[in-house]
Amino acid sequence: MNDTVTIWTRIFTTNRLLQQKQMVTDVLHSEKATVPKTEILEKIHEMCKTTPGVIFVFGFTTHFGGGKTAGFGMIYDSLHCTKKNEPKRRHIRHGQYGETTSRKQRKEHKNRMKKGRRTAKASVVLQKEGVKILQGFICGDCADFS
């Protein structure tokens, strides 16, 4: 079994405004189902002799019948240009940002923090007023409400 993968680039243009080179990438893979993006990044890295952190590929679709996949690729001039122009989701997929949590986890954490702040804040306010707190309950006979 021959696992050869051929990568062609076409419609190669230079965009000086965004400090990038953009291209359409064709991947020929006769005996494989699909090719991972990491493998495509490595091959483009070898072809263009750039650092792998400035290459972004996305939007790959396999043609009907298999054997050929086409997508879009961009090569930036520097890592600073990628941070300025690329969306955050592509940086996360590329592994340039740290581990992110889901939206639900962030909301749950926020609400847990609000609950903790509220009880701590209430106990501090009541202690300043001279009210004793016994296991979370306000002791009414100890309070001075006059």
Image: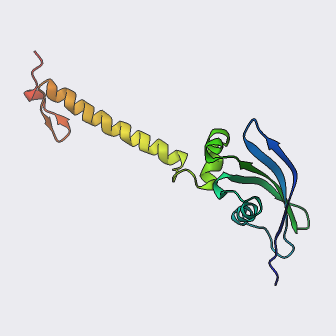
Of residue 99 and residue 48, the one placed in the foreground of this image is 48
In the image, farthest residue toward the front:
49
Color style of the picture? rainbow
In the image, farthest residue toward the bottom:
1
Of residue 90 and residue 16, the one placed in the foreground of this image is 16
Taking the spot 73% from the left edge, 50% from the top edge, the residue there is 75
Side (left or right) of 32 relative to 128: right
Side (left or right) of 46 relative to 100: right
Where is residue 125 shown, x and y percent of the image?
A: 21, 27
Side (left or right) of 66 relative to 137: right
Q: Quadrant of residue 109?
A: top left
Taking the spot 69% from the left edge, 46% from the top edge, the residue there is 77
In the image, farthest residue toward the top:
146
Taking the spot 31% from the left edge, 39% from the top edge, the residue there is 116
**119 w.r.t. 76: above or below:** above
Of residue 9 and residue 34, the one placed in the foreground of this image is 9
Of residue 100 and residue 104, the one placed in the foreground of this image is 100
**96 w.r.t. 118: above or below:** below
Where is residue 143 shown, x and y percent of the image?
A: 11, 25
Question: How many numbered discs?
Answer: 0
Where is residue 111 shown, x and y percent of the image?
A: 42, 39
Side (left or right) of 121 relative to 8: left
Taking the spot 38% from the left edge, 42% from the top edge, the residue there is 112
Quarter of the image for the C terminus: give it.
top left
Quarter of the image for the N terminus: give it.
bottom right
Q: Quadrant of residue 33?
A: bottom right
Where is residue 141 shown, x and y percent of the image?
A: 8, 28
